[in-house]
Image (cartoon, rainbow, N blue to C red):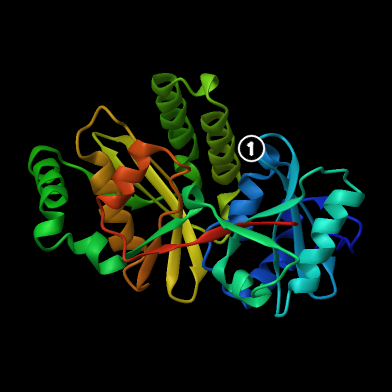
């Protein structure tokens, strides 16, 4: 266990912080995909994530899309209104942020704050998480999943494959697949794709030290798709990463279905994270008919 920073001191998030942070997150039982240690850890370099404790609440700082410093929602028991005020004041007064804000706050925190002249609360639709019934993603039953089922059946009838749990022996093959994916999608020209590339490397490099489930699809002896996720709360798993060889039709649909069946059949719901405002990604997520969206909000001062 690493040294625990106490507010107003913050420290960069490291793998050694897992026990301290995970204990708080587990007690909170989050619904938003950001609030797992794995997610915070693998994106820590891209977002410059730092953490601190104030009483029994976890405080998190990161960089926003425009490069400014912002907060993530304080995590801990209610009420967290004072923690929100504290973090916003710290950003304004100590970090000299002209427009201090907390991003990706969940509805639970918004309800705790209630109607108050102290805060402006706005929904962030691009960050809403998509949550699905696990049974739907496995069975693909009924008319609304007819096209998805056809893709999977066509793949099965035309391709011999195997699903396997991802082990340390597969890491290099997964990295090679990701490198090829990035070559095709010009990751070096897109900061978000570069951030994801780095996050995947972090996750594959440390997945044996993280509480993740991982699986892959092998075709003709080669790793052609992989997925990694973990429990978000008692009844929901979150899929952090899913990659496949896009030249193989239907492979993404099969990876999704197989990962849910083999890793998460005992968990009622699957959180497949947000769409970040990308129209194509939004349509793809909606095409799987989410059971619900997990709302997130931006909190600022008047």
Q: Nearer the viewer, residue 254 or 44?
A: 44
Q: Percent x, y for residue 27?
A: 64, 77
Q: Residue at x 64, y 69 (%)?
A: 25
Identify the element where label 1 is drawn.
Answer: loop
User: Image point 51% across, 51% down: which residue?
Assistant: 127
- Tell me the quarter of the image containing the C terminus: bottom right
Residue drawn at x 41%, y 23% as measured from the top left: 185
Q: Is residue 131 above or below residue 185?
A: below
Q: Quadrant of residue 131?
A: bottom left
Judged left or right of residue 125, residue 100 is right
The answer to whether any part of residue 235 appears in the image is: yes
On the image, the x and y values in percent for residue 202 come to: 60, 41
Residue with the mark numbered 1? 65
Q: Measured along the vertical axis of the image, is residue 292 above or below residue 69?
A: below
Q: Position of residue 100 (x, y in %)?
A: 77, 49
Q: Is residue 14 visible?
A: no
* Nearest to the observer: residue 148 or residue 245: 148
> In screen coordinates, is 245 left or right of 116?
left
Q: Which residue is at the front of the view, 53 or 181?
A: 53
Q: Position of residue 44 (x, y in %)?
A: 68, 45
Q: Residue furthest bottom?
A: 78
Residue 225, by quadrant, is: top left
């Amino acid at each position: 266990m690493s040294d625990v920073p106490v507010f107003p001191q913050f420290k960069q998030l490291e793998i050694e912080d897992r026990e301290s942070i995970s204990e708080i997150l587990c007690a909170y039982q989050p619904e938003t995909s950001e609030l797992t240690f794995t997610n915070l850890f693998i994106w820590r370099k891209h977002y410059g994530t730092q953490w601190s404790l104030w009483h029994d609440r976890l405080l998190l700082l990161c960089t926003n899309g425009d490069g400014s410093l912002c907060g993530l929602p304080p995590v801990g028991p209610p009420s967290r209104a004072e923690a929100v005020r504290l973090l916003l004041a710290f950003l304004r007064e100590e970090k000299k942020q002209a427009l201090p804000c907390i991003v990706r706050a969940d509805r639970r925190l918004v309800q705790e704050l209630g109607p108050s002249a102290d805060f402006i609360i706005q929904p962030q639709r691009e960050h809403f998480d998509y949550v699905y019934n696990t049974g739907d993603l496995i069975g693909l039953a009924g008319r609304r999943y007819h096209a998805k089922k056809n893709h999977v059946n066509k793949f099965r009838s035309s391709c011999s494959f195997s699903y396997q749990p991802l082990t340390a022996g597969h890491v290099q093959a997964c990295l090679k697949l990701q490198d090829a994916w990035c070559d095709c999608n010009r990751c070096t020209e897109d900061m978000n794709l570069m951030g994801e590339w780095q996050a995947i490397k972090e996750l594959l490099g440390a997945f044996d030290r993280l509480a993740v489930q991982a699986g892959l699809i092998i075709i003709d002896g080669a790793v052609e798709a992989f997925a990694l996720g973990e429990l978000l709360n008692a009844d929901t798993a979150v899929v952090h990463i899913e990659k496949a060889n896009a030249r193989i039709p239907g492979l993404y649909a099969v990876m999704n279905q197989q990962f849910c069946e083999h890793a998460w059949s005992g968990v009622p719901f699957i959180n497949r994270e947000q769409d970040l405002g990308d129209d194509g990604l939004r349509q793809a997520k909606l095409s799987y008919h989410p059971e619900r969206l997990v709302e997130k909000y931006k909190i600022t001062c008047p």
